[in-house]
Amino acid sequence: MKIGIVCYPTFGGSGVIATELGKGLASKGHQVHFITYRTPVRMDSFQENVFYHEVPTHDYPLFEHAPYETALTSKLVDVINYEKLDILHVHYAIPHASVAYMAKKILLSQGRYIPVVTTLHGTDITLVGQNASYQPVVTFSINKSDGVTAVSDSLAKDTYNHFDIKKDIQVIPNFIDFKRFRKSNKDHFKKAIAPNGERILTHVSNFRKVKRVEDVIHIFKAVYDKVPSKLLLIGDGPERQPLEQLCREIGLCHEIRFLGKQDAVEELLAISDLFLMPSESESFGLAALEAMACEVPVISSNTGGIPEVNIQGKTGFLSDVGNVEEMAVNAVKLLSDDDLLNQFRKAAFEQAKRYDIAHILPMYEEFYKHVIETEVIQ
Ligand code: GMT
């Protein structure tokens, strides 16, 4: 198949999944065309069957912001026509689903049909998509997609609850590539970060409010008082500065390391003992799955799709959003008992295997075939 993929090229989970999906499909012989404003972060080396089309925007004195949606639509029309794509798969509804609809309509006016699949990822539905500025367009463009997928049962339910959706939503969960995410020996890193054998707690996110990174720091403080430990904060985003301030206020700057955005997250997960994800809302929790693949149990909130990934009392512990005390008690329980921690490590790895890319990729291939075969002009 010749597949077009539109996504955010940044460190966000939707861009990561879109890029890994494209790379996986290309390795199975499909021709994959990424169409976006920058090279996606996970598209880090040359790969056969992978093509990249940058969306150029054109500034004009009248524009306060160059209209990206218009530029993306034009680029889609051009690439779909020239490369003769069979299907277009857009990740994150805003603005990609409505842009895809517009491109499809333009192509139809030229006598060409392109089926569109939209994958819903999370905040496009649970947060920003519900804002009155976007809601009608999100509803319309989901209903007009030829196929719709969501990354968890919870997200599919949220979509039906918050939007007037007539389409079937197929759940295809996120996935993990075990060639990259697996436990490896990085003892030299461990010694550098925790020279006295301290436990290592890790958090990875884009440091937005929804991630509640301040809870991560409060959990760490309570753990630190009982178990010698270090905290690694990986990623970057709008909350970083107040978080650094919080570290100063609680006097733990020397034990908490802000590592910024990291390409090789798996190397840091390989030395971690526990992963913290206290998010306010989380449709899936890809970062937790990446940790579990590296045999790291997860202390998380019980919101959204997280309970589908992190299993209570088996791969980690889940608590109500904001219940920092309980999260800290559970963290201490795991970190102060080697046997228990090892048992959870193994279970986390076993659970992660359910999301092996080798199982999930064929679901997308089947779904594409189904959508292409059931052509409905809308
Ligand atoms: O909020 C993020 O971390 C980024 C966001 C995105 O769409 O880029 O992530 C969402 O999609 C990920 C991939 O499907 C999911 O694993 C995350 O749970 C989801 N984030 C939220 O729901 C907050």
Image (cartoon, rainbow, N blue to C red):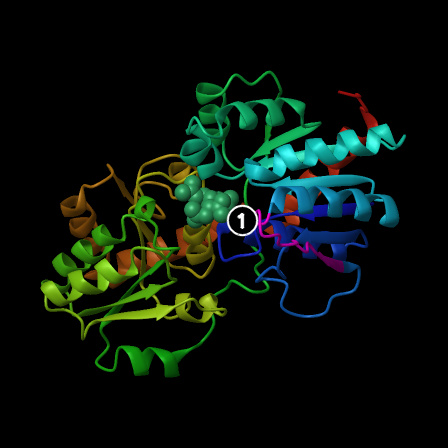
Q: Residue at x 50, y 64 (%)?
A: 182
**Residue 302: image x %, image y %?**
31, 37
Task: Tell me if the residue at label 1 has its CB under 8 Å from ligand 1.
Answer: no
Q: Nearer the viewer, residue 63 or 215?
A: 63
Q: Residue at x 45, y 41 (%)?
A: 284
Quadrant, the N terminus = top right
Q: Residue at x 62, y 27 (%)?
A: 141
Q: Residue at x 31, y 82 (%)?
A: 191
Q: Nearer the viewer, residue 82 or 273?
A: 82
| Residue 364 relative to residue 128: left or right | right
Residue numbers of the magenta segment: 51-66
Q: Nearer the viewer, residue 270 or 33?
A: 33
| Residue 212 relative to residue 50: left or right | left
Occupied quadrant, residue 167? top right
* Other-residue count near label 1 (Cα within 10 Å), few / some / many at <14 / 14–19 / ≥20: few
In magenta stretch: residue 64: yes
| Residue 226 relative to residue 189: left or right | left
Occupied quadrant, residue 48? bottom right
Residue linked to disc 1: 65
